[in-house]
């Protein structure tokens, strides 16, 4: 009886090991599939670029240049410019202790008009809500 019990225990132990090994196998394959899917998604995300035409890219570059020109003026911490046809809307964030005066508006206006011949009208605001909307 002792011998029969040992044989049964050995068979049960062997079956347990086999079932554990075979049960883990599909899970490993699933992880490989999941990793492949994640890798594929990462690759696809890297390949996605913003499709802009040459004209749109030119507008972006001009807008960035206008923003840079305005930020270089004294008392302005941040500027965002959006070009629409021959107009530009400029949102300003003034430095601490500075305010947007009529003289500063005129300086910004003349600086932009002198540096970008495609602009005929400049709209300027230091309202933070407009700056946030322009950035969006």
Image (tube, helix red, strand yellow):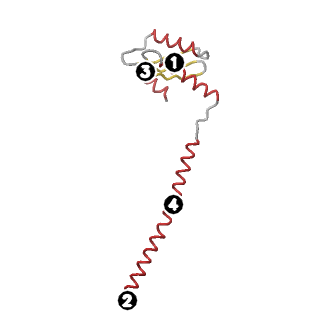
The local secondary structure at tag 4 comes to: helix
Q: CA distance from mark 3 to mark 1?
A: 12 Å
Percent of width and height locating residue 14: 43, 78
Q: Which residue is mark 2?
A: 3
Which quadrant would the N terminus be assigned to in this image? bottom left
Q: Are marks 2 and 3 in contact (CB under 8 Å)?
A: no
N-terminal-most mark, 3 or 4: 4
Q: Nearer the viewer, mark 4 or mark 2?
A: 2
Numbered circles on residues, count: 4
Percent of width and height locating residue 117: 61, 15
Residue at point 57%, 18% (across, down): 87
Residue at point 57%, 45% (across, down): 44
Disc assigned to residue 77 = 3
Q: Are marks 1 and 4 in contact (CB under 8 Å)?
A: no
N-terminal-most mark, 3 or 1: 1
The local secondary structure at tag 1 comes to: helix
N-terminal-most mark, 2 or 3: 2
Q: Which residue is mark 1?
A: 69
The local secondary structure at tag 2 comes to: helix
Q: Nearer the viewer, residue 2 or 33?
A: 2
Which quarter of the figure has residue 119?
top right
Above-or-below relation of 50 to 116? below
Disc assigned to residue 30 = 4
* Label 2, residues with CA under 10 Å away: few <14, some 14-19, many ≥20: few
């Amino acid at each position: 009886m002792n011998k029969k019990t040992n044989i049964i225990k050995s068979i049960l132990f062997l079956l347990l090991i086999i079932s554990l090994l075979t049960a883990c196998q599909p899970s490993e394959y699933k992880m490989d599939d999941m990793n492949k899917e994640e890798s594929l998604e990462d690759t696809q995300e890297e390949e996605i670029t913003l499709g802009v035409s040459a004209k749109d890219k030119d507008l972006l570059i001009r807008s960035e240049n206008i923003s840079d020109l305005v930020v270089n003026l004294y008392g302005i911490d941040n500027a965002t410019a959006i070009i629409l046809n021959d107009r530009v809307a400029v949102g300003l964030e003034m430095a601490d202790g500075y305010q947007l005066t009529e003289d500063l508006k005129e300086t910004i206006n003349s600086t932009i008009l002198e540096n970008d011949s495609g602009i005929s009208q400049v709209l300027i605001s230091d309202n933070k809500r407009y700056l946030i909307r322009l950035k969006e």
